[in-house]
Amino acid sequence: MNALDIMKRPAAYVSGYENTPTEEQNRAKQLCWEYNRTAPNEQEKRRSILQTLLGTCSPMTGIEPDFHCDYGFNIHTHGLAVINYNCVILDISPVNIGAGAFIAPGVCLACSGHAIDPEQRSHGIGTSAPITLEENVWIGANSTVCGGVTIGAGSVIGAGSVVTHDIPAGVIAAGVPCKVIRPITEKDKFKPEDILF
């Protein structure tokens, strides 16, 4: 099994820096560079670049520049995905973004990590694990989601959180490390008369 096959599997792995598929990484850097230099009115060009960059790209995917990723082919959007300014996705494992995702400015989805042992880390030993956002997840501004995490459907991650473990469906979670605060309930709905337009 080659490096790309290992990276595309929905499983954690350990690797050395010398096995990095640099050609694929350079391709992603070039496409991100082109994307980040598009004008706001060049929506068709943006869509075309995203279709080339991402592994699976729903037509309802919108990403505001600046956007950066490691490879792109490991990012999969499965419906409406609103990804705001300055998002970074370190996709050395698959990143699945469910329909109805809202990703606020400054969010980092980081599949990658490094060896805990300092000698191994200095020799470029790294780790990676997939990230899954189920449907209708909202991640607040400047949050980080670490490798191996699944965030359950409908959940909200508070701004500035660091998500190091799975979060169940239908909850509000926040903090460093991110912890469940409470379930989302009917009381969280706005009344029709409160909606101004």
Image (tube, rainbow, N blue to C red):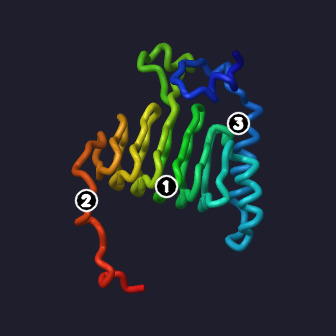
The image position of residue 2, as x and y in percent, is 71, 18
Q: Amino acid at mark 1?
A: Ala
Q: Which residue is mark 3?
A: 25
Q: Residues within 10 Å of mark 3 (few under 14, many from 20)?
A: some
The image position of residue 167, as x and y in percent, is 34, 41
CA separation in Å, label 1 and label 3: 25 Å
Q: Residues within 10 Å of mark 2 (few under 14, many from 20)?
A: few
Quarter of the image where the N terminus is located:
top right
Quarter of the image where the C terminus is located:
bottom left
- Under tag 2, what secondary structure? loop
Q: Is residue 192 left or right of residue 109?
A: left
The image position of residue 41, as x and y in percent, is 71, 73
Q: Which residue is mark 1?
A: 101
Mark 1 or 2 closer to N-term?
1
- Under tag 3, what secondary structure? helix
Decide: is 5 above or below 176: above
Please identify the quarter of the rendering in which residue 44 is found.
bottom right
Q: Amino acid at mark 3?
A: Gln
Q: Which residue is mark 2?
A: 185
Which residue lies at the image location 35% right of the left edge and 55% below the top edge? 159
- Find residue 56 and name its label: none
Which residue lies at the image location 61% right of the left edge and 48% below the top edge? 68
- Under tag 1, what secondary structure? strand
Is disc 1 in contact with disc 3, using a CB cutoff of under 8 Å? no
Q: Residues within 10 Å of mark 1 (few under 14, many from 20)?
A: many
Q: How many marks?
A: 3
Q: Amino acid at mark 2?
A: Thr
Mark 1 or 3 closer to N-term?
3
Residue nearest the viewer, comparing 92 with 16 = 92
The image position of residue 194, as x and y in percent, is 30, 82
